Amino acid sequence: MSLLESIGEPRDLRALEPGQLEELAAEIRGFLIANVARTGGHLGPNLGVVELTIALHRVFDSPTDSVVFDTGHQSYVHKLLTGRQDFSTLRQEGGLAGYPDRSESVHDIVESSHASSSLSWADGISRAYRLRGEDGRYVVAVVGDGALTGGMAWEAVNNIAADKKRKVVIVVNDNGRSYAPTIGGLADQLAGLRQTLDKVRTHRVYEGTLDWWKARLQDGGPVGRFAYKSLHATKKGIKDWWAPQGLFEDLGMKYIGPIDGHDLEAVEEALQMARDYEGPVIVHALTEKGRGYAPARAHEEDQFHAVGVIDPETGQAVERPGARSWTSVFGEEIAAIADEREDIVGLTGAMLIPVGLQEFAERHPERVYDVGIAEQHAITSAAGMAFGGLHPVVAIYATFLNRGFDQLLMDVALHRAGVTLVLDRAGVTGPDGPSHHGMWDMALLQIVPGLHLAAPRDATRLREELREAVAVSDAPTVLRFSKGTVGGEIEALERLHDGVDVLARHGSGDPDVLIVAVGSMAPMALDVAERLSSQGIGSTVVDPRWVLPVPRSVVGLAARHRIVVCIEDGVKAGGIGSRIRQEMRAAGVDTALNEVGLPTEFLQHGSRGQVLERVGVTAQRIAQDTLAQVLGTKVPFARPLPGQDLPTGQIPQL
């Protein structure tokens, strides 16, 4: 049995000797490389937190002590040490989630993968423990240096620091290059001195002595108060020279570090000091993303932050040759537009490469801004840029639009700012699970006055609609597209006067069904139409291109069909289908409409196809339901044919 196999729960770690711990760390890295290479996942971040996670579970007693991972993509090691060692179906339907998941283990707490929230969780959990009299329980939040660029993290720090008795330990997993450790003898001496000083500073006797002298000197009149201020300033200046702790200690929190996050003994000692202090403490650990895996360390872009299926020996991706992603199409087109227009600027939130702005940044580095994990700031800053005469393009994942919604509504839309938002990974994203699906955006955007929303069906329409979006200077525009590979081109039979594309017509005379395809759902809509045609049901398939505001021609077409079916990959509640129905009613059109989309649920991980099948969004299911509605055996009933009061019939198998 390997050492890793002998670990069934965190307490098993405490029986291991130092040499065994080093062996265990090596085993874990080998396990991660071999397994994540087969399934894909967040490899680099987890290779960087092996020692940190081992030490954390040796010092603290999970689940009595609560361990919260910010974002959660770096929780694979935590899963291994808490009894979950079957990674064969990681991030696949029925397998382990790629993030913490309460249904998997009592050791998992926060399932959301949205960054910068862990410290607020820690604040709330620690408040609850104090109020319930559970003073012996600690809360540990593991947060990356990147997540500290989010304002919410600092709101939480401000609150945690205000209560000196709460047992909160914030572990900063710093794998960024801004705090890269220096090397050489002097660095080693300084590191040793920092840890020696920290032992003294976090001791209760030290704190008591400081409080005694502070009280005596401040009660000693002007001379005493002057002496206290002078001594305090001298002490603080010396500490800030040794370590970058000033910001945290100015807020009233103890700071330990920086420490080598791959030195098990040093990490464990630092965490033990933090535990013994029994108050809010920051432990600053310097780590290397991709530690122990040469291909990851050599990867300049992100040290294998997230990978698909790769060759574990070389790190090379195993992928279908020639496949083009939606993101790459956007990246090429926005760079071309930026070449043509000097007023175009790009903004993103710590995702320059994933959202396709890299080429734009390489050509025009002075016009692309990465604001960190700060979507709220990005969108309001974009409003300011628009006021200043620029046209900002804010590129983020669709799921992160939620975080900047107030700014879109009140800073951009209210001021009629010409800002374009580009939402990558819209709809069902698949393996990353509930908090990464971009399924909420269209319902949210419905209520923004004056907003224009486009959903391209293929690469040509993406380029076309992006150019149309940046031509709007007096209202917000949004362009959304899916994760993954762009399908083939879908040419229109006809473009109507208001830009709506007619993709297919089946049957003669007045057709029965109007199928409205939203963006990437166009291939499925065409499949549904073919299935209906085989059963003698005529249909028209349209792609509105711009789904908001609802084009008038869609309403007009609805009046000439017996039923409307809107197929979208967002939540049905408040989605595009419901908006079309409202516009139809306002125009006096009483044609029945069936909204086909996602339920208002948190959808578990799986491939895009598996998730859609799970919720019934398949061509076969939609065709069956539509046929039943036309025949009058399922609500909403299609409008009866002339002379037919109550349509009835049997549902054939499609």
Image: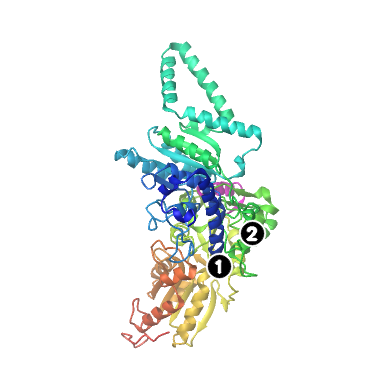
> Do callouts 1 and 2 mark residues in contact (Cβ within 8 Å)?
no
Query: Would you say residue 432 sits in the magenta stretch?
Result: no
Q: Position of residue 634 (x, y in %)?
A: 34, 79
As drawn, the label of residue 334 is: 2
The secondary element bearing badge 1 is classed as loop
Left/right placement of residue 205 relative to residue 180 reads left
**Alpha carbon distance from label 1 to label 2:** 15 Å
As drawn, the label of residue 37 is: none
Quadrant in which residue 337 is drawn: bottom right
Position of the C terminus by quadrant:
bottom left
Front-most of residues 351 and 334: 351
Relative height, residue 268 to residue 39 (above, below): above
The secondary element bearing badge 2 is classed as helix
Q: Is residue 119 visible?
A: no
Name the residue that disc number 1 marks.
Answer: 456
Q: Position of residue 322 (x, y in %)?
A: 65, 70
Question: What secondary structure characterizes most of the magenta part?
Answer: helix
Type of amino acid at the residue the image marks with label 1: Pro
Q: Position of residue 165 (x, y in %)?
A: 37, 33
Determine the residue positioned at 36% across, 45% down: 64
Query: Would you say residue 379 sits in the magenta stretch?
Result: yes
Sort mark 1 into few (<14), some (14-19) or many (20+) by Cα contacts within 10 Å: many
Determine the residue positioned at 53% across, 35% down: 257
Type of amino acid at the residue the image marks with label 2: Ile
Instruction: Tell me the magenta residue range.
Output: 375-395
Relative height, residue 472 to residue 257 (above, below): below
Quadrant in which residue 591 is drawn: bottom left
